[in-house]
Amino acid sequence: MNRCSVCHGETTSKTITYTQWYEGKLIAVQNVPAEVCPTCGEEYFSPEVTDKIQKVIELHNSIATLEVPVYQLA
Ligand SMILES: [Zn+2]
């Protein structure tokens, strides 16, 4: 059991979707284990998880994405 450093409430283990803006794009990483404070919503990650997230984001950045406009004919 960990304590929230913002409000000192007890945090609970959860699996969340982590989102971060990176070079103008919003990147979402699903199934991220985190300690979440139910009182103020602050999220805490272990150093291993933080490291993994960083690697995912770096990997994402090396993947070329192609955006196409979508038209509705109706
Ligand atoms: Zn808190």
Image: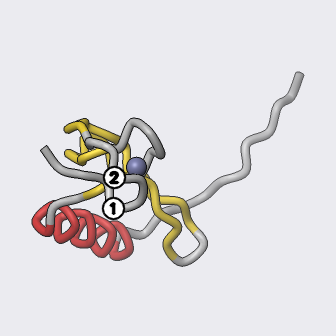
Residue 60, image x and y in percent?
Answer: 34, 66
> Disc 2 on helix, strand or loop?
loop
Question: Who's the residue at 44% across and 39% down the image?
Answer: 39
- Quadrant where the N terminus is found in the figure: top left
List the single residue furthest toward the front: 8
Residue position marked by numbered label 2 in the rendering: 8
Residue 16, image x and y in percent?
Answer: 32, 40
| The quadrant where residue 27 appears | bottom left
User: Does the closest atom of ligand 1 sit within 8 Å of the Cβ of label 1?
Assistant: yes
Q: Which mark is residue 74?
A: none
Q: Are marks 1 and 2 in contact (CB under 8 Å)?
A: yes
Question: Who's the residue at 20% across and 38% down the image?
Answer: 13
Label 1 to label 2, Cα distance in Å?
A: 5 Å
List the single residue furthest toward the right: 74
Q: Is residue 24 left or right of residue 36?
A: right
> Disc 1 on helix, strand or loop?
loop
Q: Residues within 10 Å of mark 1 (few under 14, many from 20)?
A: few
Residue 62, image x and y in percent?
Answer: 33, 76
Residue type at the position of mark 1: Ser
Residue 12 to residue 60: above or below: above
Residue 49 to residue 8: above or below: below
Question: Who's the residue at 39% across and 36% down the image?
Answer: 38
Q: Is residue 62 left or right of residue 47?
A: right
| The quadrant where residue 45 appears | bottom left
Q: Is residue 1 left or right of residue 12?
A: left
Residue 61, image x and y in percent?
Answer: 38, 74
Q: Which mark is residue 5?
A: 1
User: Does the closest atom of ligand 1 sit within 8 Å of the Cβ of label 2?
Assistant: yes
Foreground: 45 or 31?
45
Question: Who's the residue at 47% across and 45% down the image?
Answer: 40
Residue type at the position of mark 2: His
